[in-house]
Amino acid sequence: MATSSLSVIRELPSAAAKKPPAPAATLAHTDLLGGAWWQQIPAYRNIDEACFLDHTWQAKNSITKVSKLVETIQEMVPSGFVEDLELGMRHAPMSVRVSPYIVSLIDWERPYEDPLRTQFFPLASRLRPDHPKLGLDSLAEQADSPVPGLTHRYVDKALFLPLDTCPVYCRFCTRSYAIGLDTDEVEKVHLRPNEERWRRAYQYIASRPELEDIVISGGDAYQLRAGLIEEIGEALLAIPNVRRMRFATKGPAVMPMKILSDAAWTDALARVVEKGRRLRKDVVLHTHFNSPREITEITQAAMGRLFERGIVVRNQSVLIRGVNDTVETMTLLVKRLGYLNVHPYYVYVHDMVRGVEDLRTSVDTAVHIEKHVRGSTAGFNTPTFVVDAPGGGGKRDVHSYEYYDPDTGISVYAAPSVKPGQFFTYFDPLHQLGTHQQRRWADPVEQAAMIEDALAKARGRSR
Ligand code: SF4
């Protein structure tokens, strides 16, 4: 018999048995930065809210050169920092482009420790030698591309890269082989917007009935004019086998005001989402917050605007050393995203990308953080921690390794539904290993033996 609500109330435990009130720190995720904080930056002292919230002002005043940064922050940084940055930029695989929004959130008195500086401005003093097993296109996206700018790896999903520019350039970008301007270190594979290339991508998608899920990334969907968002959306929605689409953009994390001030862009996205809904097709936005510090009251207003328009937003973070590689920071990020109705979907163990060895963490760190994050909020708002297996194995749950030895830093993954019969190795950064293991890695013969041993053990255990 069903229990009446009255009897449930009578059976409530006594006050003494109740869960004690949560400490104030539990609500830290609701404490968002507001006011005109940007005015503490010398160059933004007279920038009012209307100007700061204008996405065209943000784009026009983005920092691409050291001289412009110095002009903007003036005397705020410790001595030696500018020289360190100049040298760092000379060795970086990514060009620099940082929005005033992000510049204004960096603590310039402590730039060496700041998680936002860490993501966007390379410093020579922090650089470490690349891992010996690292390649430029570590995920082998080009090997799985039937058409330039279209990657077909998973059976039912394709990655469409309509362009190669972003509102900011992240140091750790997996696609540093293509994204942004050429640098001293890397001549890029360019994927400029090109109707003919796009048409070939649509034709390929239409020719493969198993392709149901299309990710439109880049580059970044923020850089597509409103008309192009609609053009791409309509072209893909018209393909009968396409059932799901995701527009991917880092925009909300680095320039949230565009959602508020570029009504044409937001309306275009909303129209594609609405049309998709009428066709019973799912169109969502995927974004990329890495630090709880990227989330302010402006972000809250922007994400609120998308929520009102019925646009689902999911987040994919990268686990980055010095940015979000502690239980406290990752939990705060996850809870803050959930608070804004952004679903924390994935946390990627840092890809093996050139020139950013200082940013990587280990599989062990990811497993540890995941254990603590799980349970801090609802399961549907808890991200899955994944390794995007180098060599094209796709995303694997970080715990699902066939073999892992934290001492040698070698993990081996299988991807039976993506590349049956193959094994994929991921390597923790060498500077986090013990001296003995570092010495073994310095010897090419030992190196090969360690990897062969790990693969043999994985083969023995794999099911
Ligand atoms: S926004 Fe995305 S694609 Fe662009 S540089 Fe950053 S990580 Fe790479």
Image (cartoon, grey):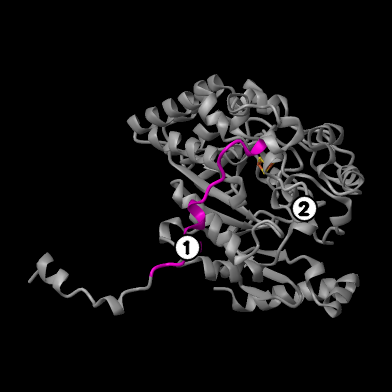
Look at the image and tell me in which quarter the C terminus lies.
Answer: bottom right
Circle 2 crowding by C-alpha within 10 Å: few under 14, some 14–19, many from 20: few
Residue 420 visible to the viewer: no
| Observer able to see residue 211 | yes
The reply to whether the C-beta atoms of the residues labelled 2 and 1 are less than 8 Å apart is no
- Magenta residue check for 34: yes
Check residue 428 in the rendering and tell me which mark sits there, or answer none: none
Picture residue at 70% right of the left edge, 73% below the top: 455
Which portion, as a residue range, is magenta?
21-38
Counting every numbered tag in the picture gives 2
Helix, strand, or loop for circle 1? helix
Q: Determine whether, in the image, residue 183 is placed left or right of residue 411.
A: right
Horizontal arrangement in the rendering, residue 150 relative to residue 445 (left or right) = left
Name the residue rendered at 70%, 33% in the picture.
164
Disc 1 marks a residue whose amino acid type is Ala
Image position, residue 158 (x, y; %): 56, 41
Residue 362 occupies which quadrant of the picture? bottom right
Q: CA distance from mark 2 to mark 1?
A: 27 Å
Residue in front for this viewpoint, 220 or 20: 20
Q: Quadrant of the N terminus?
A: bottom left
Which is closer to the viewer, label 2 or label 1?
Answer: 1
The spot of residue 6 in percent (x, y) is: 10, 67
Q: Amino acid at mark 2?
A: Arg
- Residue nearest the viewer, comparing 351 with 460: 351
Extreme residue in the left direction = 1
Vertical relation: 181 (above or below) 452: above
Q: Position of residue 24 (x, y in %)?
A: 47, 63
Q: Earlier in the sequence, mark 2 or mark 1?
A: 1
The residue carrying mark 2 is 110
Tag on residue 24? 1
